[in-house]
Image: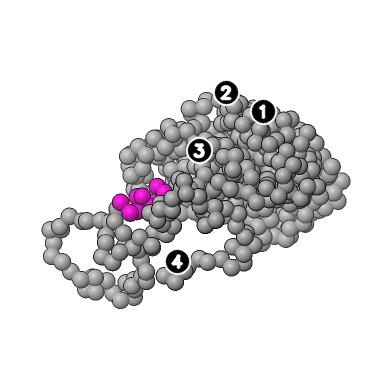
Amino acid sequence: MAEEQQDRRTPKVSWRNPSLLFELSKPGRIGVELPPVGVEDASLEDLLPEEVRRGEVEGMPEVSEVDVLRHFSRLSRRNFAPDLGLYPLGSCTMKYNPRVNEELARLPGLAHSHPLQPESTVQGNLELCWALEQILIRLTGLERVSLQPAAGAQGEFAGILMAKAALNHRGEKRKYILIPDSAHGTNPASARFAGFDVKELLSNDRGTLDLADLEREMTEDVAALMLTVPNTLGVFENQILDIARIVHSKGGFLYCDGANFNAFVGKASPGAMGVDVLHMNLHKTFTTPHGGGGPGSGPVGVCSELVPFLPAPMVEKTAHGYRLDMDRPLSIGRVRTFNGQFGMLIRALAYILAMGGKGIRQVSENAVLNANYLRKALEGKYHLPYVSDSMHEVVFSDKNQAKHGVTTLDIAKRLMDYGFHPPTIYFPTIVSGALMIEPTETVAREDMDAFIEAMLAIAEEAETDPEMVRGAPYSTPVLRCDEARAARQPRLRWTPEAV
Ligand SMILES: *Cc1c(COP(=O)(O)O)cnc(C)c1O
C-alpha cells in the first residue's frame, strides 16, 4: 500500500508483506531433514564428474519449511482465481474445475504410474486414453483423435503439420494458409512454424468470414483455412458449410480452432460441418485446470485422409488388450514426450463421465445463455461493435465511456475493486478498446447479476467521476502499474541491491 494511503487503523507491520522468499533467507536455515542413510558418506566430487555438477547457485534462499509454506500461502491470498469468484477472461474459459477430477487424477495407481512401464502393467491407463479418444471422436464427428498435444497451440501445430504431410503425400506443395482477422493469435504463429505463409481474410459486418473474399483467396496454392469457431468475437460462422465447400473445391483442408468447443459441444458436430482437422482445449471445454502457463492439453482430431499422419504412438485396442502403436510410417512423429499430459486426460474423462451426454450438452447451452444474459443486461450502457448473436462470449468496446476519458484499461482495473477478475481486454484486435467477456457456464445467476451490477456502476462512475475510475484499482495488493515500463524494462533477476 502506498505510504500516503496508510492510515492509523491499518498499522504497518513488516511481517505481513515480505514480498520475496529471498528476503526471508537466513544463512544455514534449511527446510528438509533427511533420515540417516545406511551407507557411508561419499562426496559429490567422487560421485559425479565435474562437467555434470552444478556450480554454486548465487543467492539461493535458505529458508525453513514454515517460511516456504507461509510465503506461498500469503502469495495465493494476493491473487485471484476461479475458486474465489467470477473470472470472465474471454477466450480463456476460466470455469470451475470440479474437485472430483482432482480426486481421480490423484488415485495412486494413476498418479504413480510411470510412462516407461511395460504396456502389460499399464493396461488401465491405456484403456483410459482409448476411452477418452472414443468420446472425443463421438463429440467431434471426426475419424481419430491424438491426445498427445500439450496445449491448444500445439494441437494447431500438429494439425497443420498433418495437413502439410498429406499434401506432400499427394505430391502437392502448397504455400499459404488463410486465416481470418477474427482468429486467435496462435493460428498465424502455428502456420508460420509449420513453414507456411499466412494470408489474412477480412470479416464482414456480421463479424464472420466474407465468402467473396474467401472465394477470391482460396486457390490451389492454399493448404488450409484456419477458422476459429466460434470466432474471437464470440460469433458462430453460420456459413460454415459453404466455407467448407469452397475450401474443399480447391483441394485444401478446413482447420477448425475448437479451443472454445464449450460453445457447441454436444450440440453440433464439427465433422458434419465439413471440418477436416480440429483441436480442442481440454483445459477450457473439459475443466482441466489452467492458468499460469500450464499444464494444458490440446487433443487434435482428424478426418480419414489425415489419420495416417497422426502423431505416434496411438493407443490401439486389440483382442489381447491395449497397446501403443509406434508403427506409423507416415506419421508426423512425436509432438510431445510419452503420451501427452496424462493427468489432464484423467481429469477430462472424469468430467465427461460425471456430466454424461445430457450434461455435456447443457454445458454449451448454459455457456451461451450466460453470455447472452450478460449481453442483454449491458448493451444499453456498453457499446456492442457487432450485433450478431453471441455464443459463449460477448465483445463490447469502450466507445461510450471513452467520451468521458475512461478507457477499457480503466474499466478493467476498476472491476478489481468490485471483486471481479477483469475480462480479456484489447482483444480481438479488430475491435478498438475491446472488452471480451466470457462468464462460462459455471456461474450462477446471482453471480452474473452481481457482475452486471458492477459493470453498470462503473459505466455510471465513468460519467460522473471519470477521474476516480482512471485511478483504479484502490483495493488490491498492487495498485495501478506502469504497464509499458514493466514490459520495456522487465526486472527478471533478483539481486540483493534490488530489494
Ligand atoms: C486458448 C486458445 C488457443 C490457445 O490454446 P493454448 O492451450 O493456450 O495454447 C487457441 N485458440 C483459441 C480460440 C483459444 O481460445
Identify the mark nearer the N-term, 3 or 4: 3
Write down the residue under mark 3. Answer: 84
Write down the residue under mark 2. Answer: 358
Number of labels in the image equals 4
Identify the mark nearer the N-term, 3 or 2: 3
Are the residues flagged by discs 2 and 1 in contact, CB closer than 8 Å? no
Please tell me whether mark 1 or mark 4 is closer to you in this view: 4
**Residue 91 visible:** no
Q: Which residues are magenta?
A: 66-75
Identify the mark nearer the N-term, 2 or 1: 2
Identify the mark nearer the N-term, 1 or 4: 1
Q: Per the image, is 340 magenta? A: no
**Residue 31 visible:** yes
Q: Secondary structure at mark 3?
A: loop
Q: CA distance from mark 3 to mark 1?
A: 22 Å
Amino acid type for the residue under numbered disc 1? Leu
Identify the mark nearer the N-term, 4 or 2: 2
* Whole-percent x, y for residue 248 in the image: 76, 44
